[in-house]
Image (cartoon, grey):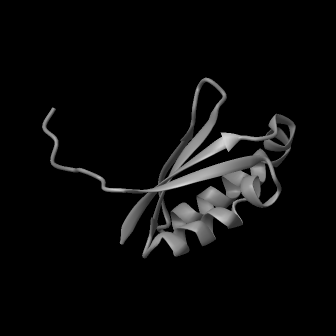
């Protein structure tokens, strides 16, 4: 499995507010299915970040496009494959 960092940039604040419950339900289902590693909003209102797990970028984009924020025009997205490092010492 690969990881993909998806930045959901704000496109329409009103649509984002209206469709937030649907977006959060979608993320909860994806987390339960093992497709979302983590997610959260940016405190400056710029949007949010979701880390997806998928076989390849095409599969990740397919998941992203199912998000109500994307399918209903509330947000735009940018996706990057992410090489998660887990060997850091703190």
Measuring 47% from the left and 68% from the top, which residue is drawn there? 34
Q: Quadrant of residue 18?
A: top right
Q: Classify the position of the N terminus by image quarter.
A: bottom left
Residue 33 visible in the snapshot: no
Q: Residue at x 55, y 41 (%)?
A: 40
Residue occupying the far top of the picture:
44
**In the rendered image, is residue 65 in sight?**
yes
Answer with left or right where residue 29 lies relative to residue 34: right
| Quarter of the image with the C terminus in it | top left
- Position of 79 with respect to 86 (left or right) is right
Tell me residue 64's x, y (percent). Answer: 62, 62
Q: Residue, x 22% and y 50% (percent of image)?
A: 86
Residue 75 locus on image (x, y percent):
73, 47
Q: In the displayed structure, would residue 88 be above or below residue 62? A: above
Image position, residue 88 (x, y; %): 16, 42
In the picture shown, does residue 88 fall above or below 24? above
Q: Position of residue 8 (x, y in %)?
A: 63, 46
Question: 80 or 45, which is in the foreground?
Answer: 80
Query: What residue is rendered at 45% in x and 59% in y?
Result: 4
């Amino acid at each position: 499995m690969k990881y993909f960092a998806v930045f959901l940039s704000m496109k329409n604040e009103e649509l984002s507010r209206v469709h937030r419950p649907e977006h959060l339900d979608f993320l909860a289902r994806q987390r339960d299915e093992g497709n979302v590693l983590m997610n959260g909003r940016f405190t400056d209102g710029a949007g949010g970040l979701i880390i997806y797990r998928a076989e390849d970028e095409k599969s990740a984009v397919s998941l992203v496009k199912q998000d109500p924020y994307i399918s209903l025009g509330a947000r735009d997205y940018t996706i990057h494959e992410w090489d998660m490092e887990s060997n850091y010492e703190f």
